Amino acid sequence: MSPIFVRSLPFGLYITVLVLEGLLPGWAPAFDLRWLYPVKAGLVALALAVLWRHYTELRSYGLPLKHLLLALGVGVVVLLLWVSLDAAWMIMGDAGKGYNPTDSAGRIDWLLVAFRVAGAALVVPIMEELFWRSFMQRWVQRAEFLALDPSRIGLKALLVASALFAVEHSQWLAGLVAGLAYGWLYIRTRNLWAPVIAHGVTNGALGAYVVTTGRWSFW
């Protein structure tokens, strides 16, 4: 299979369901759109599992302790910046109410929370880092991206991939900062698991923050 295809398919499935979320209110107004998230995360997880043997950059599971600590630190720093960079001019379009797992009485549906946190912390980081960092960031630098050592990624490729990553998020400035941080981490460690772990820490901790504070717009 094409190395571009196998790294783009999970991301493409995610975006397709995201588009569907915008269309469903007109097609099926009675459907609870919150249950599309488990579908979206499940489809991506299935695609990753089926294509896993093609992801050579993820075959090495070990990270030196210093790189693991660096990844954890980057994940926490990105989280702190993410919840701070939410001024009106830092948001693209209408952020809306976010993913609100409460019912009409204000009670939290913990099954929805579990699906959301698991998808965001375990599935999305692998899917996005494969697409944005391993593929896009290296491809901008060199068309034969699989042959490119991550340490050889230049500033232009880092900026382009991070800018595109930012456009994917309504909090575009926070997305840009996150893209630069994860991209730098990939270059620094030369191991895709480092940004995957950092991304997972950010998303997992953000989930805990959102549930604790009720600031659903961050979801």
Image: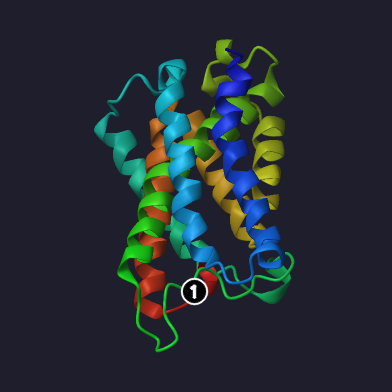
Please indicate, yes or no, whether residue 94 appears anywhere in the rendered image.
yes
Q: Quadrant of residue 57?
A: top left
Q: Amino acid at mark 1?
A: Trp
Question: Which residue appears at 32% of the width and 64% of the height?
Answer: 111
Q: Does residue 128 lie above or below 177 as drawn? A: above
Quarter holding the N terminus? Answer: top right
- Horizontal and vertical percent for residue 145? 62, 16
Residue 143, picture quadrant: top right
Q: Nearer the viewer, residue 169 or 154?
A: 169
Relative side of 46 to 84, left or right: left
Coloring scheme used: rainbow
Instruction: Note whether 209 is above or below 55 in the view shown.
Output: below
Residue 208 vertical position relative to residue 62 in the rendered view, above or below? below
Q: Residue at x 53, y 22 (%)?
A: 150
Q: Is residue 10 left or right of residue 67?
A: right
Q: On the image, which quarter does residue 93 sit in? A: bottom right
Q: Is residue 146 left or right of residue 116?
A: right
- Front one among 91 and 43: 43
Location of residue 66 in the rendering, given as x and y in whole percent from the top left corner: 29, 35
- Given residues 134 and 43, the one toward you in this image is 43
Residue 101 percent across, percent down from the top left: 43, 72
Residue 76 seen in the figure: no
Q: Which residue sits at x=65%, y=75%?
A: 87
At x 51% / y 56%, what residue is drawn? 36
Within 10 angstroms of label 1, few (less than 14), some, or many (20 or more) residues? some
| Horizontal relation, residue 67 to residue 217: left or right | left
Mark 1, secondary structure of its residue: helix
Q: Which residue is mark 1?
A: 216
